[in-house]
Amino acid sequence: MTKDAIKAVMAADAPLKPGGSNYPEPFASRVAGRSKRPLGDMFGLQTFGVNHTTLAPGTESALLHIHSKADELIYVLSGHPTLVTDEEEI
């Protein structure tokens, strides 16, 4: 990316991920109130993912999962989410 191609974008104005969830039913309905804006894709990131995700009340952001070769960071801007792990709900 050239210096001239760099631009500022408000995360909420980025395009939504097309196609919705990759989960099959019965799991897709659990994330049906989720909208994702893949910010990293806009800037050509290939080894670091950045998403702006909005959840309707009661919607799950993802199914319980682990990453063996990556970390995951969630930064909450508003609301009161619940983190579910194997051991507890926080």
Image (cartoon, rainbow, N blue to C red):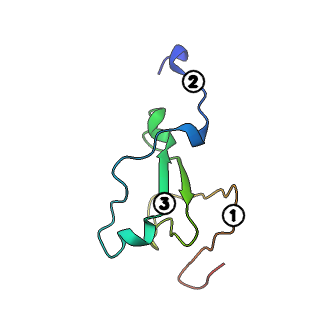
**Total numbered labels:** 3
* Residue located at (45% from left, 43% from top): 47
Label 1 – label 3 distance at C-alpha: 14 Å
* Residue located at (46% from left, 34% from top): 42
Label 2 – label 1 distance at C-alpha: 29 Å
Front residue of 83/69: it is: 83
Which one is earlier in the sequence, the residue at label 2 or at label 1?
A: 2
Quadrant of residue 8 in the image?
top right
Please tell me the numbered disc located at residue 7.
2
Q: Quadrant of the C terminus?
A: bottom right
Percent x, y of residue 28: 36, 68
Mark 3 residue type: Arg
Helix, strand or loop under label 2: loop
State the residue position of label 1: 79
Helix, strand or loop under label 3: strand
Instruction: Please determine whether, in this image, residue 76 is positioned above or below residue 14.
Output: below
Mark 1 residue type: Gly
Which one is earlier in the sequence, the residue at label 3 or at label 2?
A: 2
Which one is earlier in the sequence, the residue at label 1 or at label 3?
A: 3
Percent x, y of residue 34: 48, 60
Q: Residues within 10 Å of mark 2 (few under 14, many from 20)?
A: few
Assess whether mark 3 and mark 1 are in contact (beta carbons under 8 angstroms): no
Mark 2 residue type: Lys
Please tell me the numbered disc located at residue 53.
none
Q: Which of marks 3 and 2 is in front?
A: 3
Instruction: Please determine whether, in this image, residue 11 is positioned above or below residue 28.
Output: above
Q: Residues within 10 Å of mark 3 (few under 14, many from 20)?
A: some
State the residue position of label 3: 34
